[in-house]
Amino acid sequence: MEKAKNNSLETTVTDFILLGLSHPPKLRTFLFLVFFVIYTLTQLGNTFILLMVWADPQLNARPMYILLGVLSFLDMWLSTVIVPRVILSFTPASKAIPFGGCVAQLYFFHFLGSTQCFLYTLMAYDRYLAICRPLHYPVLMNRRLCTVLVAGAWGAGSIHGTIQATLTFRLPYCGPNQVDYFICDIPAVLRLACADTTINELVTFVDIGVVAASCFLLILLSYANIVYAILQIHTADGRHKAFSTCGSHLTVVTVYYVPCIFIYLRAGSKSPLDGAVAVFYTVVTPLLNPLIYTLRNKEVKAALNRLRGGRGATNEKK
């Protein structure tokens, strides 16, 4: 009897079936096109930012735009980890994902997502130094230190992803294998485990809660100091310029953190809203980031004009 019990706790699942987003069958083609267009625009928009930062000497010399370039790179890969599987779910193709593929998707999703959390915090710190400590900014946030901080964010994100993937898949999975979600993520996968998941849910709550809450609190602290410093500026033009500089980042932080908190601090929830909320910060946010950071950014527009001017001058010489 004991042997049979132990055997029943061994992982026998070789693949998972991603059920995807619930939708009326009539909308399948429409949703396929919507997500395909979103994915294409996300890649194009973030590639545009990467190329702008790389090609313009004035942008790639400033930590703010180095961080923005890293964010675009993260958005491209986060979108690639998630969206192609979502698009596939609207086709007649098999919805199966190998066990190893599910492990990889969960790892990279949390690796890239947590790295993004750390990066948003660094971006807030950069704005804090630029506005509150302008005279010391070149010393406190130079290109070398920025590179070290970004490397630290990548390293911490990798550790976080490893912890979450290891804890999730150390549990036995012996069937069923249908994941009621559009990706392999912790809450949905844990429901299929053949063992008690209380400890996993607690660790998920604490780990992700600590990472998200710590980053969010540091961002709020940075912006509290920034707002105080801005209010000390006597000219309306100076206040407007400072607020517009920070407004883009604060908008992105809000649309990223609120859905994350909604999903992961309710790990045991089976609400039908979870899928829609998760789509917003995994699919829509990477699309919005290039728009938010470029449409109102005069420096990016100026860099684009410089590149156009340089190209025009080159053509005239020829």
Image (spheres, rainbow, N blue to C red):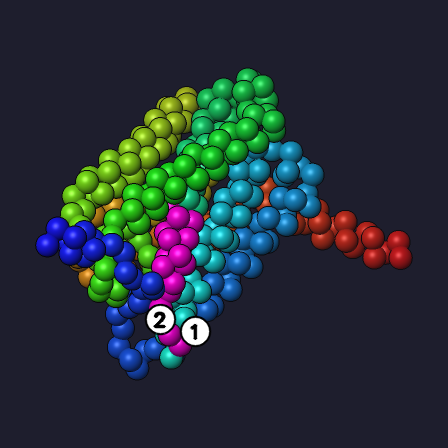
Q: Marks 2 and 1, how far apart in space? A: 18 Å
The image quadrant that residue 97 belongs to is bottom left
The percent position of residue 131, horizontal first and vertical second, equals 48, 26
The percent position of residue 45, horizontal first and vertical second, equals 54, 56
Q: Residue at x 47, y 63 (%)?
A: 39
2 or 1: tag closer to the N-terminus: 1
Do we see residue 302 in this rendering?
no
Q: Is residue 74 above or below residue 134?
A: below
- Packing grade of label 1 (10 A; few <14, some 14-19, many >=20) is some
The percent position of residue 256, horizontal first and vertical second, equals 35, 46
**Pointer 2: what residue?**
95
Tag 1: amino acid: Leu
**Pointer 1: what residue?**
33
Q: Residue at x 43, y 34 (%)?
A: 156
Image: magenta residue range:
93-110
Decide whether residue 28 is among the magenta residues: no
Tag 2: amino acid: Lys
Position of 143 with respect to 197 (left or right) is: right
Classify the position of the C terminus by image quarter.
bottom right
Q: Residue at x 51, y 29 (%)?
A: 149
Nearest the eye: 23 or 159: 159
